[in-house]
């Protein structure tokens, strides 16, 4: 192999290594996305929410997902819980979840009380101030809200 060809091979190899290193950094700061049904991330997030409901309300449920966005180990979910057979529906459940070493854990659930503040842009700004590193992009914009 000639010296010029060796240099090209080494440069290409170095570029591949750099792309792998920086590619990992890009995925760590991933753009917010909605994991679709069948996606293991979606299942893991909803399993974390299901576990929270079981621990706090002693009810086994499945979710109709109205909104779900994930980024950087954080998720915001807006769901309609129902019984596994679909015969019973429960009040809407929204939650902020964080991925930990043990899976997705619920960090915050807005109050469902009638006199509670609305879950809107002001509410999300409050969460962004309280939780360092929380990605703004996981929260719905007003035009995305379905309620």
Image (cartoon, rainbow, N blue to C red):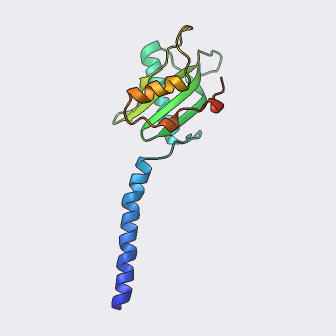
Q: Is residue 29 above or below residue 130?
A: below
Q: Quadrant of residue 15?
A: bottom left
Quadrant location of the C terminus?
top right
Percent position of residue 14, x then y: 35, 71
Instruction: Please state which of residues 118 and 17 is positioned toward the viewer in this rendering.
Output: 118
* Total count of labels: 0
Instruction: Please state which of residues 4 and 1 is positioned toward the viewer in this rendering.
Output: 4
Instruction: Please state which of residues 11 and 52 is positioned toward the viewer in this rendering.
Output: 11
Percent position of residue 35, x then y: 55, 41
Residue found at x 50% / y 46%: 31
Q: Is residue 51 above or below residue 11?
A: above
Whether residue 13 sits left or right of residue 110 in the image: it is left
Q: Is residue 95 above or below residue 19?
A: above
Quadrant location of the N terminus?
bottom left
Percent position of residue 55, x then y: 42, 17
Percent position of residue 61, x then y: 54, 21
């Amino acid at each position: 192999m000639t010296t010029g060809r060796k240099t090209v091979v080494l440069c290409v190899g170095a570029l591949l290594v750099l792309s792998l290193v920086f590619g990992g950094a890009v995925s760590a700061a991933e753009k917010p996305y909605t994991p679709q049904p069948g996606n293991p991330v979606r299942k893991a997030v909803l399993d974390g929410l299901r576990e929270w409901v079981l621990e706090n309300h002693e009810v086994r449920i499945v979710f109709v997902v109205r909104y779900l966005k994930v980024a950087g180990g954080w998720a915001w979910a807006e769901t309609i819980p129902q019984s596994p057979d679909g015969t019973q529906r429960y009040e809407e459940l929204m939650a902020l979840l964080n991925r930990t070493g043990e899976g997705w854990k619920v960090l915050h659930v807005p109050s469902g009380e009638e006199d509670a503040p609305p879950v809107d842009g002001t509410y999300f700004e409050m969460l962004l101030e309280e939780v360092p590193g929380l990605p703004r992009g996981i929260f719905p914009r007003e035009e995305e809200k379905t309620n």
